[in-house]
Amino acid sequence: MERSRADGGGGMSRDVSSCNTYNYGDAAYWDARYVAEAEMGHFDWYQRYTALRPFVRSYVPDFSSPILVVGCGNALMSEDMVKDGYQDIMNIDVSSVAVHMMSRKYEGIPHLKYIKMDVRDMSFFSDRSFDCVLDKGTLDSLMCGTDAPASAAQMLGEVSRILKAGGVYMLITYGDPSVRMPHLDRPEYGWQVILFIIPRPGYEKPANCTSTRSFLEPVPLTEEGLLPRDFYLEDKDSHYIYVCKKMDEDQISRTIPDANHSE
Ligand SMILES: C[S@@+](CC[C@H](N)C(=O)[O-])C[C@H]1O[C@@H](n2cnc3c(N)ncnc32)[C@H](O)[C@@H]1O
């Protein structure tokens, strides 16, 4: 799992081997890490809100929409969204250290709430209660933990359950479609997946690069859920944004004809 400095300072560090070294799926690991890094105050993995803003604003146009940030850590993402106008952001994390720090930091801000919760069991929330679930690096953490496929399925099942029809699960990840689509493209979730690819912070186009592709344009996926064969990845350390839009019951039964029929 890579850790990209998204704050524009100090460039970027990359540690792909750490997925096997640390247990990113383990609450104790994160607690220890947030204690050790307490002086740093905050850290955003992969990207800051400024880079993600066009996608968030486009798919969550209503500032009063209830939004859930899963695995919030001590990122500034939610604070930045409130500064941009969003009014109802619930944040959860499995680390009691992170949740304690963030609850204290934002205790005077009613638009931001923090609760300690495992993303694999969000039974505290009712079905269809959020317009958007934002995930920056949390599915990635579970994918580095033990029993990754089962953890991912539990998490994504819960995310689908708590999303309203028409709502979106926005996943920001280093995982390309070959490793993420098999988890996302499951009929039981009822998601239409739209993919965007953005360069890591600080990436500079090489002088000889002739591409005119806009990062705001969706990247088409093949029927198998892969990148087109001729797709050229400008920055090989790009981040992937999967916008998983929850279909309503009618759309689901048109896509899966037997969805309403039990055997
Ligand atoms: C890579 S960090 C990302 C933090 C933050 N979203 C960001 O963008 O900077 C992953 C976060 O997921 C949290 N996490 C890991 N497993 C979790 C779980 N099962 N339930 C909830 N949060 C979890 C960790 O505590 C950590 O804060």
Image (cartoon, rainbow, N blue to C red):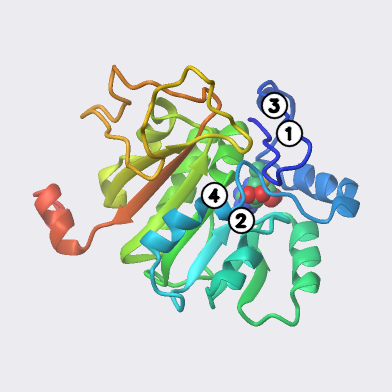
Is residue 146 visible in the rendered structure shown here? Answer: no
Using a 10 Å C-alpha cutoff, classify the residue at mark 4 as few (fewer than 14 neighbours), some (14 to 19) or many (20 or more): some
Determine whether, in the image, residue 138 is placed left or right of residue 98. Answer: left
Label 2 beta carbon less than 8 Å to ligand 1:
yes
**Residue drawn at (79%, 36%) of the image:** 10
- Which of the labelled discs sits on residue 118, or is there none? 2
- Label pair 3/4, CB-CB below 8 angstroms: no
Q: Is residue 234 above or below residue 166?
A: above
Q: Secondary structure at mark 3?
A: loop
Q: Earlier in the sequence, mark 2 or mark 4?
A: 4
Q: Is residue 163 above or below residue 43?
A: below
Q: Position of residue 128 (x, y in %)?
A: 37, 69
- State the separation of the CA atoms marked 3 and 4: 19 Å
Q: Amino acid at mark 4?
A: Ala
Determine whether, in the image, residue 225 is placed left or right of residue 64. Answer: left
Q: Earlier in the sequence, mark 3 or mark 4?
A: 3
Residue identifier under label 3: 14
**Residue drawn at (74%, 63%) of the image:** 99
Determine whether, in the image, residue 102 is placed left or right of residue 221. Answer: right
- State the separation of the CA atoms marked 1 and 3: 10 Å
